Amino acid sequence: MLFQTTPDTSSYLLLGFVIFGVVGIGFVLSIYVRMRNLRRDTKMIEELLEDSDKH
Amino acid sequence: MEPASRNLRTLTYISAALFLVSLYMVFFYAPLEVVMGQVQRVFYYHVSSLWVGMLAFLVTFIVGIIYLRTGNLKWDRIAVGSAEIGLVFTIMGTAGGAIWARPIWNTWWTWDPRLTTTTIMLLLYVAYLMLRQGIDDPERRRRFASVYGIVAFVSVPLTFFAIRIWRTIHPVVIGTGDPEAEGGFNMTPRMVQTLLFSFFTFTLLYITLLWHRVRLERLSEHMAALRAKFVS
């Protein structure tokens, strides 16, 4: 045979984009979760400081 | 902490929209590469991710120098944010490359000069983040991290030029590479356009993520100050 057929490598394509998606979305989520937790903790400490100032 | 500014929100929406367009281009606009098949489409994000990784480490290097000269905290916030984003994109690009290599090189991994220098670069920036975690005194942490970020940057040009200096099987995208490289191909105009668009989109994504990450760092410093006040 002088010609070559295109190999079916679509499963690797799928795997590649799943990895890109998991790592990328995971990082965005980590920023969101860290931000949310810090906001919550900051609010809590600010309230505690306000309370201690009153007493 | 004030909510995200209008500019940041607009940039986030634009980045997300451009990312969707780039996905469309990768899957539907760029033609099928007949020798490698569908897996060649991984190449667009593999190259773009590693480009952002190197760009991010370059930014860490530059702002590290500026921080050491000025002592302004904002440069240190950018340095740590950029290093973290660079690491994420380098991991993404390296993993994508390994997946591409399996059907093309018949192996997930080989200790080729490019892959070896990429691993060294990646580990150096993992160590950068570990170093920051390991020093309690904020002023000392910032100074040490800046110096480390400057020194670790040596690995970036080394990684970039590895395929142009040494014998390698890794193909060169821009310029001419080793004739023994496996998996190289001639890009059609649509492939070039898709690659350039992915480059642009990933760069914009980097800027957007960095902005968000710097805000996170600022909030973290505010929290540390409040905690110190509460304890005292």
Image: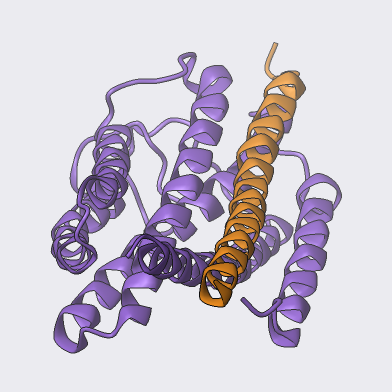
Chain colours: A orange, B purple
Q: Residue at x 70, y 10 (%)?
A: A1
Q: Residue furthest top?
A: A1
Indicate the position of residue A47 as horizontal and vertical percent values.
Answer: 62, 67
Of B206 and A44, nearer the camera is: A44
Image spot of residue A12 (x, y percent) = 67, 23
In the picture, residue B209 is in which quadrant?
A: bottom right
Q: Residue A42, how many percent across, how many down?
A: 57, 63
Where is B228 relative to B155, above or below? below
- For the point 47% across and 20% down, which residue is it? B105
Quadrant assignment for the C terminus of chain B:
bottom left
Front position in the image: B205 or B230: B230
Query: Where's residue B69, x and y in %?
Result: 15, 86
Q: Is residue B24 left or right of residue B142?
A: right
Q: Residue at x 58, y 76 (%)?
A: A54
The part of the image, by quadrant, that contains residue A9 is top right
| Number of callouts | 0
Q: What residue is shown at x 43% (from left), y 58% (from top)? A: B174
Horizontal side, residue B14 vs residue B185: left or right: right
Up-down relation of residue B183 to residue B23 (above or below): above
Could you tell me if residue B59 is visible in this image?
no
Q: Is residue A55 visible?
A: yes
Is residue B63 left or right of B22 when viewed as pictured? left
